[in-house]
Amino acid sequence: MRLDHLFVFAIFISSFIMLAFHLSRSPALTFGSVNRGALRPLPRNVFSQNKVEQILFYPRVPKCGSGTFQKILTTLSLRNGFHFVGSPNYRRRMRTLEEQEELAKYLQRESDLHGSIGRTRHVFFINFKQFNLTKLTQVSLIRDPVQRFISVFHWRRVPHLAKFHFSFFLEHQEPDLMTTNNLTFKSWVVKDLETCILTNDIECSFRYGMLKESMVSYFCGQEAVCLQYGDPRAAKLAFNNIAKHFSLVGLMEQYENFLQRAEHLNPLFFKNGLKIYQDMASSGVVCTFILIIFLFTNCIRSNYFQGQHKRLQRVNISQKAMTHLQSRMKFDFDLYYFVKQHFRW
């Protein structure tokens, strides 16, 4: 039997074991457990201006549980009676002032047409109040920066997404920081994360002032400085925007607490969100099993991934590499701990 056939067979066996393990437990808690005791109160006035409004806007931060949250919102829209549409645009984070105003007008038109609405975008923060759109609830989710970076690194290299992310990666790098002549899709897609970190490869580098999308960028806004990694002006803008414009920013590590808080914030949009999540977690085990087989089988069959499945499986990194990342990503950790403190997670 060929090695790749043995590999697929091993994945099947492992997946069945995982399936049996999950089914033997209570509903899976994919991201974090809820404290069944009383919720800790949030700072006064955090929700004072955003109780049960007509428009919910969710600016998605990639690899922070946003896909799951969008599925939850889709189900909640049917149960709770509001109109929800996700966005297929994953590429353009920054918008011109005219485009921002047009988005605000779109939200208002949709609200006038449908009543209560929910919308999402992969976009950096937009201050809708400057366009007189005040009846708005903005919520978002973030994640431990190192775990998010590891997830993003591997997500970019999933077979059916890799070419898209490679072109996106090239578009958002400074030419003087990268030798593009030596970077091909094939060499990029099999890049090893551990080596990337320890050699300070451009993809795993976080140099002050370099052009780099970060978690801070998503809350900083539409200014050019928001893509300048480590710039204190960007951090200050992000902190101010979170405090003034976001009703809730959750932690993926406390996903259930986030959903419970969201329901407390605005039952019109979020009532039964926690229950739907738990139902999804338990019913999603079979889907996860199918997805594992699909991804690994495609990795083996693809010419780009021949002989590289061991690298693709490598998710954990050494403590040395972890320490390097933690020290380099202080900019994102400052945001993470600000959110943790401001919303009392």
Image (spheres, rainbow, N blue to C red):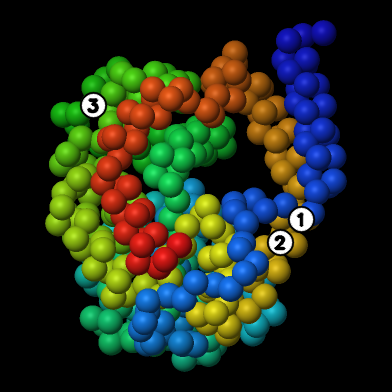
Residue at 24%, 72% in the rendered image: 98
- The disc, 3 or 2, on the residue closer to the chain's N-terminal end is 3
Q: Are marks 3 and 2 in contact (CB under 8 Å)?
A: no
The N terminus is located in which quarter? top right
The C terminus is located in which quarter? bottom left
Could you say which is closer to the camera, residue 207 or residue 57? 207
Could you say which is closer to the camera, residue 334 or residue 69? 334
Residue 234 is left or right of residue 42, and the answer is left
Residue at 80%, 49% in the rendered image: 25
Q: Are marks 3 and 1 in contact (CB under 8 Å)?
A: no
Task: Report the amino acid beneath label 2.
Answer: Gln
Question: Residue 165's image quarter?
Answer: top left
Which secondary structure lies at badge 1? loop
Image coords of residue 270 (percent x, y): 59, 76
Task: Report the amino acid beneath label 3.
Answer: Met
Which secondary structure lies at badge 3? loop
Q: Are marks 2 and 1 in contact (CB under 8 Å)?
A: yes
Task: Report the amino acid beneath label 1.
Answer: Pro
Tag 3 residue: 178
Residue 91 numbered tag: none
Quick one: label 1, few (<14), some, or many (20+) residues within 10 Å? Answer: some
Image coords of residue 143 (percent x, y): 45, 51
Q: How many marks?
A: 3
Give the distance between the C-alpha atoms of the residues marked 3 and 1, in whole angstroms: 46 Å
Question: Residue 178's image quarter?
Answer: top left
Residue 169 is left or right of residue 141, and the answer is left
Image coords of residue 113 (percent x, y): 51, 89
Give the distance between the C-alpha atoms of the residues marked 3 and 2, in whole angstroms: 44 Å
Is residue 62 in sight in this rendering?
A: no
Residue at 41%, 39% in the rendered image: 146
Tag 1 residue: 27
Residue 278 numbered tag: 2
